[in-house]
Image: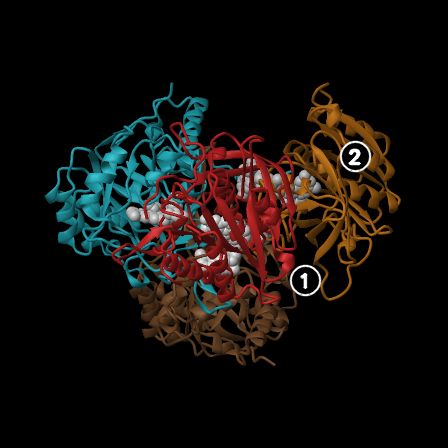
Chain colours: A cyan, B brown, C red, D orange
Amino acid sequence: MVDLSVTVGGVRMKNPVMPASGSIAEGMADVVDLGRLGAIVLKTITPDLRQGVKPPRVVEYTDATLFSIGIPSKGPDYLLNHTVPFFDKFGPPVIASISADTVEDFGKLAGYITDPRIAAIEANISCPNLRAHGRAFGMDPVASAQVITAMKANTTLPIWAKLTPNVGDIAEMARCVEGAGADAVITANAILGMAIDAETMTPRLGNVVGGLTGPAVKPVILRMVNQCAEAVKIPVIGCGGIATGEDVVEYMLAGASAVQIGTTNFVHTSAMEQSIDWVADYCTRKGIARVSDLTGALMLPGDQPSEQRGAVAL
Amino acid sequence: MVDLSVTVGGVRMKNPVMPASGSIAEGMADVVDLGRLGAIVLKTITPDLRQGVKPPRVVEYTDATLFSIGIPSKGPDYLLNHTVPFFDKFGPPVIASISADTVEDFGKLAGYITDPRIAAIEANISCPNLRAHGRAFGMDPVASAQVITAMKANTTLPIWAKLTPNVGDIAEMARCVEGAGADAVITANAILGMAIDAETMTPRLGNVVGGLTGPAVKPVILRMVNQCAEAVKIPVIGCGGIATGEDVVEYMLAGASAVQIGTTNFVHTSAMEQSIDWVADYCTRKGIARVSDLTGALMLPGDQPSEQRGAVAL
Amino acid sequence: MTMTATAQAEAPAGRFPRAENRCRVVSNDPVNAEYRLLLVEAPATGLTAYAGQFFHLLCPTTHTDQPFLRRPMSIYRIDRENRRLGFLYKVTGKGTRALMTLGPGDELNATGPLGVGFDLPAGTQHVAMVARGVGLATLAPLARFAAERGARVTAILSARAPDLLMSRDELEAAGAGVIEVNDLDGTSKPEDVADRLREIHAEVPIDFMATCGSNRLLGLTRGLCAEWGIPGQVAVEAFMGCGLGMCFACVVPVRDAEGKEEMKRVCYDGPVFSVNEVTTW
Amino acid sequence: MTMTATAQAEAPAGRFPRAENRCRVVSNDPVNAEYRLLLVEAPATGLTAYAGQFFHLLCPTTHTDQPFLRRPMSIYRIDRENRRLGFLYKVTGKGTRALMTLGPGDELNATGPLGVGFDLPAGTQHVAMVARGVGLATLAPLARFAAERGARVTAILSARAPDLLMSRDELEAAGAGVIEVNDLDGTSKPEDVADRLREIHAEVPIDFMATCGSNRLLGLTRGLCAEWGIPGQVAVEAFMGCGLGMCFACVVPVRDAEGKEEMKRVCYDGPVFSVNEVTTW
Ligand SMILES: Cc1cc2nc3c(=O)[nH]c(=O)nc-3n(C[C@H](O)[C@H](O)[C@H](O)COP(=O)(O)OP(=O)(O)OC[C@H]3O[C@@H](n4cnc5c(N)ncnc54)[C@H](O)[C@@H]3O)c2cc1C
Ligand SMILES: Cc1cc2nc3c(=O)[nH]c(=O)nc-3n(C[C@H](O)[C@H](O)[C@H](O)COP(=O)(O)OP(=O)(O)OC[C@H]3O[C@@H](n4cnc5c(N)ncnc54)[C@H](O)[C@@H]3O)c2cc1C
Ligand SMILES: Cc1cc2nc3c(=O)[nH]c(=O)nc-3n(C[C@H](O)[C@H](O)[C@H](O)COP(=O)(O)O)c2cc1C
Ligand SMILES: Cc1cc2nc3c(=O)[nH]c(=O)nc-3n(C[C@H](O)[C@H](O)[C@H](O)COP(=O)(O)O)c2cc1C
Ligand code: FES
Ligand code: FES
């Protein structure tokens, strides 16, 4: 029996697979056994009530999507009175996610939602949809660290810092939030993108820019996960472009302790469950006793016989 | 008749479509009429002779590739004695591209290859394959500006600064190189990525990291082109993920004055010629007299009737 | 609007009322120049669908088309005896082009049934439905359900041209009285359709209206419902991401009784709304 | 090694010696459990191919496979009379799986002919070729060319099992004497193959060798060429990006006469190299 459990940023999970914030809601429980997940991550809320941005809100590519939603939020009371009770009953630890316009509000909101039914809080400092042309908190290392400090000051819950990939040096960002006391980093949110309709000469999204997500971003985020894992001691949670159990293994080899699946949930509701099964099979097949042994187990060229691997003389 | 000509960074071209550096070589002339192109951009050379990185050098995705080549270079003399004469005969302006390990070498090399058969020099400050985990000149605004200053001091040729997309604020980079005297910016080089083989637990590329290119990166680079075009007065050349004439139009609407096609040349050798034809048809169909009128002609939501465009009540 | 019955014939039981149904294609043939009827054999969960609900279809990858997201399709026919579901679709873009390539025996992965369908007030005597284009697909099962509940059903079908009219048979088989109008002979003008309905109402009072497929018909329906003081419902479309209420891509502005506007998800809060909720477009 | 003739039968004329040939599939049938033969009707440029060259094939997108890059395939048959080209391929991964779905009448976009093929020294009397697996595909047209030029051809075909042996007919039709060896009965051991070749050489001296498809056979060929002081060539494979010498993805280390190592492009500088150039793997 493979031990699939992992402990990530103060949260013990029975397996390393969870949904990415904003990629499931109540409707998922109609289709999927949420009890099987490593954790249940809720959609980001803000202190205020928000309706989100103007549609159209999604553009589709070959294996990616560009979404611009704008974090519709029903606020913290709805979260505590409706959302948390709904998801609490399935068993896995429930992870909240918050965003705000100021450092102080991040802190206050973290304090406000501190509740025994919540296992950790994600700091969504990286949402690309809130600002025109996508400047976000998470693009500034100082502001990011301040957010984490403020949250830690207001809650005893573990804080997971969700980084934005729209930075030059993601490892530096990871180090900053680690320094501020984050219990884990999530690498990463969506990559800012834009879509134009040549015929109408207008943007395809109501919000002009949106976040690129889905399988196409995997190579970029995988690289960032590897960079973060080499930079910090706190666990790294891989997020971006994961669709299969094989992807989960790749992220763990690159250094992730757990992973989040986002866009794929919209197309294949069974992807999380299938990924868990695939990883278990993989570990069995490879004789790996604990899934946590995969974390960072990538063998770099120095570690292996340095034969030429790109060509074969026939 | 649509006027397809554009003048970009001191170079007059009969149309806005050219190959991206490293995406054509002598072999292309066996298949394609290079005389039809707006310009012919040569592969980057370095002052020294280089063999490039260890294979495997390419990984394939659904509509992207991850290449890590490492700029094999035969040096400036080979460029002047073989490469330039070979491409000079086709007619379109020939653009050289250089890279180096130091600011001084960038300057010297620019001076060394200054030649009447070369119309402009690209400063490849952004190649992601040269440094482990991809730190590059182009990720530092000061170093980038210094490279341009050094090149301008050593040559009378126009300098096109090729930015790296692996930065948090590409507009800021564009402003820096503009300030240093660049005659155009190219947005952008490849996005750093990584690929792992779960079965062997090793990286798929000999160089571990590589550059993600091809259609999948379009939404990201299109957004960056738009950001750069809003930030600088010098022309922006769009590069990244362009495969069709429709893509060319989208980049121009976003603010590009011309475009470069890279990876697509590897799969569809006729893509550049077909794109030129498509753009001409598009302009004719839309009653656009000069292709240069497309540059920045995107209508943003403020400019248009603000109806909801994402949903229709049926 | 008080509702005391829903169009749902069988309560979807069990822990998972919705599923990724792996259906088997029975047939997929053209109905006219623009529309096709896709008939599939569906597992039990799929067969709990009721009028106004939809399925989110995974479209195959073909030589030319690679649709990444699923595509929403209203349930057009629910044939529980033969364990079959039917979708009536218009070939529009890459997803529906890809659907076209499915042949008998192929698998169709259809997540559903999804959304909130029509909610027919108990004791409804006479349902009038007006639909255009593919909106017919959405209303057909409502006609059958209403007829089964003993209500009279009058369906006005509108189309650009007579040869693009569809579903007369489906609706008549469901027990509806069918009136066809079209743009070519000018019979489809909203004011004419309204007059036609007023005449019918004068004969046998209409106490519920349903519509789908056109903004003008929505306006017309809303107006007549107000005129007669009866409830009316509309099935709304939006471009969708997940279809399960998770991504908030498919929102439309909806007005509550106090006139406060709120964004609601077509896939989860709808696709059927009261004609008074949906703001004009 | 001095070369005075090439395996090229017709000089490729015109401004564009290579092209994106839009070919029409004639047939695409299995040859044995692992290999298939793809026959296509090709435009003029495609038909200028000669032995050792290859085409870069655009593989279709299928329900399960979306190969983005082209896939290189050696030219296996050049039938200029019927304007046909043949490819012998092994179904390996997504590209070749996708090729499998092509049927008669379908289009195949084949860029080529590409690369530098075999360069048969003028006056060659007796060519010995040793190949394994799909390497046969690459050597078959050389056998035909050599035979046409009046040379005797001896081909040793190696495979895991007798039923995986191929191309005996193709090679015999080309005028080659064929010897089959396999792993099952142990006849394919390099030392045994070498002894076999020494016997043949003793009877009718071999003055040119060609190989493809196995590192062990390359070593064997290099050894015998050195032993007999004759030239030998090998067709090399590498994972390719462009196939046109533009991307530098397909490089292999090659040793020049002074022993200096350099990276060369398999697609443009090769795929055929001297057995002495290619360093061991
Ligand atoms: C609840 C519901 C029920 C439906 N029922 C039916 C039905 O029974 N029968 C039926 O035929 N259709 C039905 N539809 C519509 C159907 O889903 C669409 O026609 C289908 O998704 C089109 O997909 P496609 O890939 O063929 O076209 P696409 O290639 O996706 O697009 C077609 C057109 O829409 C435009 N478009 C695509 N995405 C956007 C966007 N985000 N914003 C603005 N424009 C966009 C494209 O530019 C293009 O012009 C229903 C829709 C909903 C929401
Ligand atoms: C000049 C030349 C001529 C050839 N002629 C023939 C021929 O006549 N007949 C024939 O059958 N084959 C021939 N080949 C080989 C053929 O091109 C490959 O078998 C084919 O490309 C495989 O494609 P695929 O999509 O089916 O497999 P893929 O799915 O691409 O891959 C198959 C296997 O290769 C591995 N792989 C893929 N890319 C890389 C990489 N960059 N580095 C390391 N491993 C990788 C994969 O992991 C997988 O295990 C030739 C190759 C060359 C270079
Ligand atoms: C529709 C949508 C809504 C999202 N909402 C949130 C959110 O509320 N909070 C957040 O931190 N990330 C949000 N994200 C980002 C995802 O959590 C995830 O980081 C991103 O989609 C990358 O993962 P993926 O490629 O697996 O989708 C959202 C993404 C999508 C596509
Ligand atoms: C194989 C390969 C080689 C490249 N070589 C160079 C180079 O020498 N110099 C350079 O500035 N960019 C180089 N690039 C980057 C391209 O010029 C281009 O910026 C990038 O590929 C994005 O465009 P695309 O998506 O159209 O390919 C190379 C890209 C590839 C794929
Ligand atoms: S489509 Fe995702 S919420 Fe409706
Ligand atoms: S495959 Fe591109 S250089 Fe050989």
Per the rendering, the mark at residue D91 is: none
Q: Position of residue B258 (x, y in %)?
A: 49, 71
Residue C267 showing in the rendered view: yes
Asked if the beta carbon under badge 1 is closer than 8 A to the nearest atom of ligand 6, the reply is: no
Q: Position of residue C123 (x, y in %)?
A: 40, 41
Q: In the rendered image, which quarter is residue B28 located in?
A: bottom right
Q: Position of residue A310 (x, y in %)?
A: 54, 42
Q: Secondary structure at mark 2?
A: loop
Q: Amino acid at mark 1?
A: Asp
Q: Chain of mark 1?
A: B
Q: Is residue A270 left or right of residue B118?
A: left
Q: Residue tagged by mark 2? A: D167
**Gap in angstroms between the C-alphas marked 2 and 1:** 32 Å
Q: Nearer the viewer, residue B120 or A292?
A: A292
Q: Residue tagged by mark 1? A: B30
Q: Chain of mark 2?
A: D
